[in-house]
Amino acid sequence: MKAVLDTCVIYPTVMREMLLGAARLGHFTPVWSARILEEWARAARKLGPEGEAQARAEIALIQSRWPNAEHPAKLGVEQRLWLPDAADIHVLATAITSSADVIVTVNARDFPRNLLAEEGLDRRDPDGLLHSIWLSDPDGMTQVASSTLAEANRLSGDQWTIRALMKKARLPRLGKALAT
C-alpha cells in the first residue's frame, strides 16, 4: 500500500516516528511531495530558528532513507481538483500522481471520502492506521513504540509511559493497545 503522509502527520515527531517505523517494517510505502516537506520545515519555525534547522536535518534523513518517496504532482492535476481547503489540493494531487492508495491525515473535513473515492483513494487517520498495523504485527509495532518512547524520554528528560506518550501524540487507540 502506498500512503501519502500529510504534513499534519509528519509533524509532530512522535506520530512521524510511529508512521515511519511502520513503513520501515514494510507495512506501507510512504509518499510525500517537496511541498509537504517544506510545510513541515515552515511549521517547525514556531519552535524558533533551531526548530526549522532540526526539521530540515530530519527531512534530509528521511529523503535519504526513502529516496523514491517524493512525488511532485503532474502539471495540470491540481487545476482539475477541488477540496474544501484549497491549500490541501497539492496533497490530493500528489496522491493521484503517485498512484497512492490512501492519504494519512488528521484533517478529515479537508479530505472528504466521497471526493477521494472519485480518485480511487481512501483517507485514514494515523491512529486507526497504526492500530490496524499493530493488530497484524504487534511485535514489530511494539519495537517501534519502545524505541520511540526511549528517544522521547531521552530528549525530554521525562519518564513517559507508552500510553501517555501515544495519547499526547494523538494516538490513543494505539497507546491503549501497546499498554496491554
Image: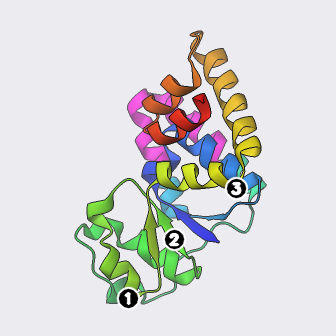
Q: Residue furthest front?
A: 180
**Residue 102 vs residue 60: left or right?**
left
SS class, disc 1:
helix
Q: Earlier in the sequence, mark 3 or mark 1?
A: 3
The answer to whether residue 146 is seen in the rendering is yes
Indicate the position of residue 114 as horizontal and vertical percent values.
Answer: 31, 80
Residue under the image location 52 percent in, 48 percent down: 10
Indicate the position of residue 150 as horizontal and vertical percent values.
Answer: 69, 22
Q: Up-down: is 45 above or below 82?
A: above
Residue under the image location 68 percent in, 55 percent down: 136
Task: Say few, some or many: other residues with alpha carbon within 10 Å of mark 2 (under 14 / 14 to 19 / 20 or more).
Answer: many
Q: Up-down: is 138 above or below 33?
A: above
The residue under label 3 is 23
Amino acid found under the numbered disc labelled 1: Glu
Residue at mark 2 to residue at mark 1: CA–CA distance: 13 Å
Work out which quarter of the rendered image holds the C terminus and state it: top right
The quarter holding residue 140 reads top right
SS class, disc 3:
helix
Residue at mark 2 to residue at mark 3: CA–CA distance: 14 Å
Depth order, front residue of 153/57: 153
The residue under label 2 is 102
Tag on residue 118? 1
Q: Earlier in the sequence, mark 2 or mark 3?
A: 3
The part of the chain drawn in magenta is 39-59
180 magenta-colored? no
